[in-house]
Image (tube, rainbow, N blue to C red):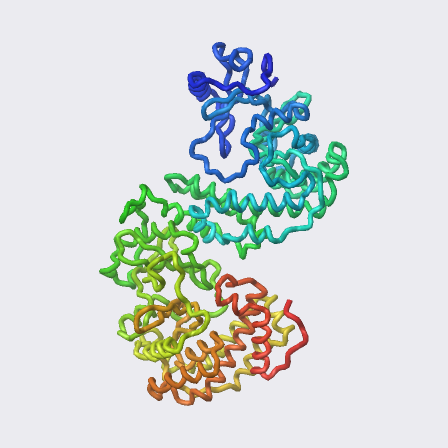
Amino acid sequence: MSARPVSRPARPVRLEPAASDEILRLSRRDSEIGRGHHNTNHVWKVTPSLAPLLCLEPGAKVVVRVRKADVLPVVVRTFIDEGAILRSLREVQPSAPQCLAEGRGFVIHSYVEGRPLSDHSENHKPVDSLHIEAVVNRLTETNRVKAQALPPLPSGWPRADDSQEFWRLVTGLAEWGIRRPHWAEFGRLLTELGVPADALIRLRERVPALRSRPFGLVHGDLHRENLIVSEGADTPLACIDWELATYGDPLYDLSTHLVRMRYPSHQWDEVIEAWATAALERIGPAAVEGLAEDLPHYIAFERAQSVFPDVMRAAHDLGSSSDERSLNEATASVRRALEAAEEPLQLASVRSTSEIEQILFRWWAGRPLAPAGRRTTRVRKIDWQPDRRLPERPEFPHTAVPFALAAEGATPAHRFIEGTAHRNSVMWPAEFPAPVVMRRASAKADRRERRHLEEWAVLRAIERSGARVAAPTVLALGSSYGGEPFVIHTYAGEPDLDLPPRHPVDGLLPREMDALVDQLCELARVDHRRLDPAADERDFFALLCAELVRLVRELPENSLRMAVLLGLPEADRLGEILADRRVTRRAPALLHGDLHPWNLVRRDDDLLLTLIDWERALVGDPLYDLARHLYLTRAAPETRMRMFSRWASKLDPAYTRDHLRDYDVYHGLEFVRSAYVDLDRQVTGAGRAAPNVQRALALDSYQSTLGAALRVLGLSARPRALA
């Protein structure tokens, strides 16, 4: 039986410090029955000396709920006083515990006899029908408690039947009460996991047209550990842990229960139908208005918002160690949260288990062992394996790499940049005089277009050549936890790392056009034979055409089907059309291969621009590099003529002959490539976060690209809209 007070007080007893200390000391020696996110619960038999204080018989069982000192505050509480909530339930749920006393850092609740429902059926296992019936009875009974019986609600709370405003409220509380307060600490981690900062805001903006339902008290956290099964009792199921209770739409309580209870999928309909029957009986027809239409919105929100506390807790609980077991548990928890949130938050994808583990390890490794001083921070020793192809650099010795690896995990979200091929972390390692960039291959890398050269080798070749080309310097090359490769570059942005790099997104200034042409000409001085020994014998234009045909052949089925519907040819037909195109053979040189505005960074010396992101570098016709840049920037005719004139005057004729005639061929080929690549990104979502991709994927921009590509190929547009 449950222990009940001899003479129940109207309010909990406030214990004096001496009594509080004694109860804490004695209760901690008794059995621990639960360790939740916020409290540790101990079952304690009341001693004869303290029984009168609690109005209990000596030996009666109570639950001493001790507040954890290191709890991560990732929940939003409507009511501070859980005891007041329990008092409001006395009439509708007498089986709920009562708050008997309050001490320093703990409360004492009456003991509910029984075992958690999780002891009877584990998560994802079926719950028997009798328990389901009891659960929905508790849910609907709870909703009968109205605002008049509760502590005052926060100001601005929605009126008692405005479900739409309640939706706005709970989605806003998740953003401003959970996500934002912890973004400085966990933002980098969530961003690298693929959860953007504005995910909840975008969800909130998709406000559904909810039907109105009568508000009442909702538990908000009714899972198997919070349901106590009492064999032989008049009420076989009691609800405990009311800390997250709130006041609002009854469907919100049903949705949180369905998600957190982890029913097997085949039981959801049974639970929803049982709840609807109980709600009709206990609350009335208004409670089930719009049930079928509105419940999915609340379920989606619950799955979406849970990714933030679940990921934060998993990372936080790694604590001071990252042993294999802890990392495995945290990785599994994070993956479950991401999978649940993938659809409602419209995440691009869910990282693999190994990627999640590596990301968690990096975040953990970036936590300082001691507070940062003015110049140094104690960091964990992080093992890494150098790649011997890159000699150790005196200005960045191998002993500096662990500092960079530690700084990587501590990089704030706004200095973590994911492009189409790499994840970049901009940081300033301890004991190094300048900021650096840690580059790792992106799990979501756009692999449609093949990479020809290794970026680090290209940058080393540029450096060794002495050419006046402003490009990053490779400082270190190796692999870290889990064998994941990395490369460390010098940073081309502002000295103030909180300022974004200055990209010429609105176009190059005349002096910058000249500076870019000069650097492209300087690339001819780089020894390309060490990078690509066969380049001098290769037909570069034929290679470009063959690569484009391969790209089309390897498109996903849905992308290729859409391309054909829009009038673009399949791979074999495209190859036949391109076989008739020719350009003059010119001397090869090293090419950047992807000079869009976000791969150019303004600088303050006479070079004016730094060329970054060389992962698509290749050896070939220098005309192609200039033609592709002019295509990617959609340069005006006067810009094109200025750059071509300077380019032709500075290079040897072996690199430039017939360039004005062949420019149109390269320019047309880029329209064709973009028609396929941009359409594939529209269909699959690949690489859409990159700013250059966002510009290309604007619908009016794509329609123009498609029309130009069809004209280049001599084909007619089909009257079909892009879906």
**Residue beneath the point at 76% across and 33% down:** 281
**Residue beneath the point at 66% across and 30% down:** 148
Q: Is residue 714 above or below residue 80?
A: below
* Residue 317 percent coordinates (x, y): 44, 39
**Residue beneath the point at 58% across and 26% down:** 84
Left or right: where 689 falls relative to 723: left
Left or right: where 512 falls relative to 705: left
Q: Residue 202's image quarter?
A: bottom right
* Residue 667 percent coordinates (x, y): 49, 81
Foreground residue, 306 or 449?
306
Foreground residue, 12 or 444?
12
* Residue 308 percent coordinates (x, y): 51, 45
* Residue 567 percent coordinates (x, y): 63, 76
Left or right: where 155 falls relative to 498: right
Q: Quadrant of the C terminus?
A: bottom right
Left or right: where 468 falls relative to 242: left
